[in-house]
Image (cartoon, helix red, strand yellow):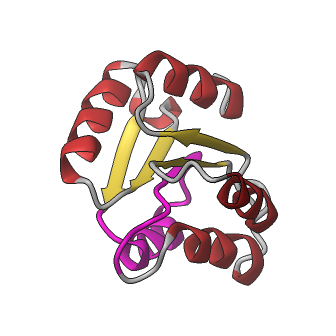
Amino acid sequence: MTESLKKKILIIDDEEDLVVLLKGELESAGYEIDFAFDGESGYEKYLKGKPSLIILDLKMPKLNGFAVCKKIRRENNDLETPILMLTAVQEDADRLIGKVVGAERYITKPFSIEKLLNEIEWLVPA
């Protein structure tokens, strides 16, 4: 697959080990990866890079996942870029808030790479 045809995924998560793991798995699956370890720098990378998909944690320093999602949807009026929340938070209320602020999908940790890849393929078909 040529570089220009690769789908770009932005991972915003403060768990560095998880980001490294996801980066390796997703690059192996043919995606171009960018990442940030806090909500504020993740939002800045979103503004610069316009990714095909954002994988977003909820609990992070500087800006939490809900705030990042809200900024993308409301301040930028971006209703197109799919947002997948990947988080350890398993409360139904948080799932609902995630939907309200604009996340398309919500996966809780621990998760399988296969499930994540299936969700990504569903959100950004080749």
Above or below 5: residue 11: below
Give the quadrant of the N terminus. top left
Of 31 and 103, which appears nearest the observer? 103
Question: What's the residue at 51%, 53% (across, down)?
Answer: 89
Kindly tell me whether residue 1 is visible in this rendering: no
Above or below 48: residue 23: above
Of 19 and 32, which appears nearest the observer? 19
Of 86 and 93, which appears nearest the observer? 93
Q: Position of residue 115 (x, y in %)?
A: 53, 21
Question: What's the residue at 59%, 46% (across, down)?
Answer: 52
Q: Quadrant of residue 44?
A: bottom left
Question: What's the residue at 32%, 35% (across, down)?
Answer: 22
Above or below 93: residue 126: above
Above or below 48: residue 123: above
Kindly tell me whether residue 37 is visible in this rendering: yes
Q: Is residue 5 magenta?
A: no
Residues in magenta? 37-61
Of 34 and 64, which appears nearest the observer? 64
Q: Is residue 46 magenta?
A: yes
Q: Position of residue 105 (x, y in %)?
A: 68, 42
Question: What's the residue at 81%, 64% (across, down)?
Answer: 100
| Tally of numbered discs | 0
Q: Position of residue 24 (x, y in %)?
A: 25, 30
Q: Position of residue 75 (x, y in %)?
A: 71, 83
Give the quadrant of the C terminus. top right
